[in-house]
Amino acid sequence: MVRLIAATLAALTLASAVQAQEAAKIPTPADTYQELFHQVQTRRLFADGKTFVDAVPRRAPARILADYRAHARFSDAELKRFVRANFIVPEAGAAPKPSAARSPIKAHIAALWPHLTKPPVKPVAGGSALAMKKPFVVPGGRFREIYYWDSYFTMLGLKADGRDDLVDNMIDDFGGLIDAYGHIPNGARSYYLSRSQPPFFYAMVGLSPAHRNPDAYKARVALMRREHAFWMAGEKDLKPGQVHRRVVALADGAILNRYWDDRATPRDESYREDLETALKSSRPAADVFRDLRAGAESGWDFSSRWMADGQSLSTIQTTLIVPVDLNSLMYGLETAIVQGCMILADWPCVEDFDKRAKARKAAIDTWLWAPEKGAYLDYQWKTGQRLDHLSAATFYPLFVGAADERKAHVVAQKAWDELLAPGGLRTTVVRTGQQWDTPNGWAPLQWVAVSGLRRYGEDALAAEIAKRWLATVEREYQASGKMLEKYDVEEAKAGGGGEYPTQDGFGWTNGVTRALMEPAK
């Protein structure tokens, strides 16, 4: 039986790895439009690098490229005319204009769901959009497609507003992506296929009770196992100190995960910015590009967490880091598979994933807990150093139940002392100008912290974070009528920093705000 389990798991992992690697080879706009793409992006024809990669060709891509090559030289104005003649260029999505009289924020959020809900998508040859079979909710603004980890937090609000239909649709859409590509990409675009994002699919499945549709639940547990296989591809033959894609073997043989991307080129949607970052680095450009992409897979794009000097993006080293949040979520995934397989009476699966979850919890305690700092911290596997970058990621072991009672209370005290700001929870305690550093606070991190603290009976801090965050969101809503992607929690106002302007919409802010308005359970 043990051999059968091992053989089945190995086959699943290999199939997932092959499927994901093939997905990473699917042409992106950079592959399809080549020098035309390079010129549009480097000459900054559009203020936002995401505009052109989301454009839809009006005719065959090969003919567009041939006509471009036949033209001796384009001025910027001529090139823009050429692009608009040959592509349907998207405009930034805007939320409904706020009225002078503000409706209650709960009603405002309910009114935003239809605006952010998009119909099924049928791909167009030469375009970047991936197929979506059911309606789904997008973040808003420049983010016109479904995103992976964003969606869990959006779904919290949908559930609070009784939109179980959309919750199930989105779970099914993500399941369709796993079926098609072996993993859930960063977002539903071809240029995101080479990476994933923090694995919250198991938590989404948890929002839809198993008893409501037993057949769907069985299929979803199978999808969770396939996602696990994607993240663990290459684990079998690793020796201590070795790495492969998203797995790292530590000195004691424990296997943990890192963020990674199967391409080592500039991101299509941030092409010019990535080229500029690589020029500032003394490292090989491909290594910089890979680390930038891995930073995007983390969802924290970008943060001092990933920087070797703690300040400069050109020193980014994401692939050298074993992150607290990712490994906590992998523990959450493994324990969710245990629970799912118990419901399905699949006892070999229960045994296998229970063993995996226990091993991961022990590894998190060994490698990511810093008793002298009173926090869970990231680990640099190549130098063997635990990184002294305190961040809100320290709450993830509490969120998934991987912390023991003592550690949870120590983390809570650390948060009272250093992470709690006037307007909510700080992301980090350093200023770099990057959007995933102080003074910014983000809705998903507020929810992870509040949920984790409640789990361990730290209700006072959980309530304080929720109260301060809701006050920040309300204050900005009253001032501008907007629900923003991020907020400055030091001054309780709109956030800033990063590669693009602060976006309005906004899916996960709506979701977390709405969920925090519900009585604590």
Image: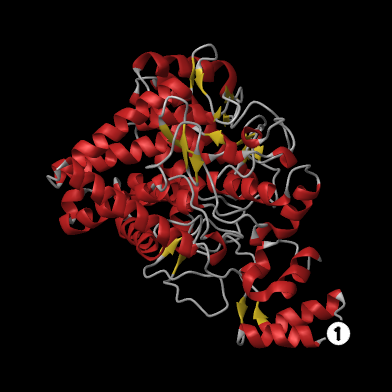
Residue sitting at the far left: 345
Q: Is residue 290 left or right of residue 450?
A: right
Give me the residue at 39% from left, 31% from top.
399
Residue sitting at the far top: 372
Circle 1 sits in a helix, a strand or a loop, which is it? loop
Q: Amino acid at mark 1?
A: Ala
160 vs 415, nearest the viewer: 415
Quadrant housing residue 170: bottom left
Give me the residue at 76% from left, 70% from top.
40
Q: Is residue 293 visible?
A: yes
How many circles with numbers are drawn on the protein? 1
- The image shows residue 234 at horizontal and vertical percentages of 42, 46
Give me the residue at 12% from left, 45% from top.
345
- The image shows residue 434 at horizontal and vertical percentages of 69, 40
Q: Is residue 377 left or right of residue 157?
A: right
178 is higher (above) or lower (below) than 492: below
Give me the residue at 52% from left, 54% from top.
195
Quadrant assignment for the N terminus = top left
375 is higher (above) or lower (below) than 46: above
Residue density around tag 1, few if under 14, some if 14–19, many if 20 or more, within 10 Å: few
Q: Is residue 485 visible?
A: no
282 vs 251, nearest the viewer: 251
Residue occupied by mark 1: 72
- The image shows residue 11 at horizontal and vertical percentages of 30, 54
Quadrant assignment for the C terminus = top left
- The image shows residue 184 at horizontal and vertical percentages of 43, 56
Quadrant housing residue 373: top right
135 is higher (above) or lower (below) than 88: above
52 is higher (above) or lower (below) than 292: below
513 vs 419, nearest the viewer: 419
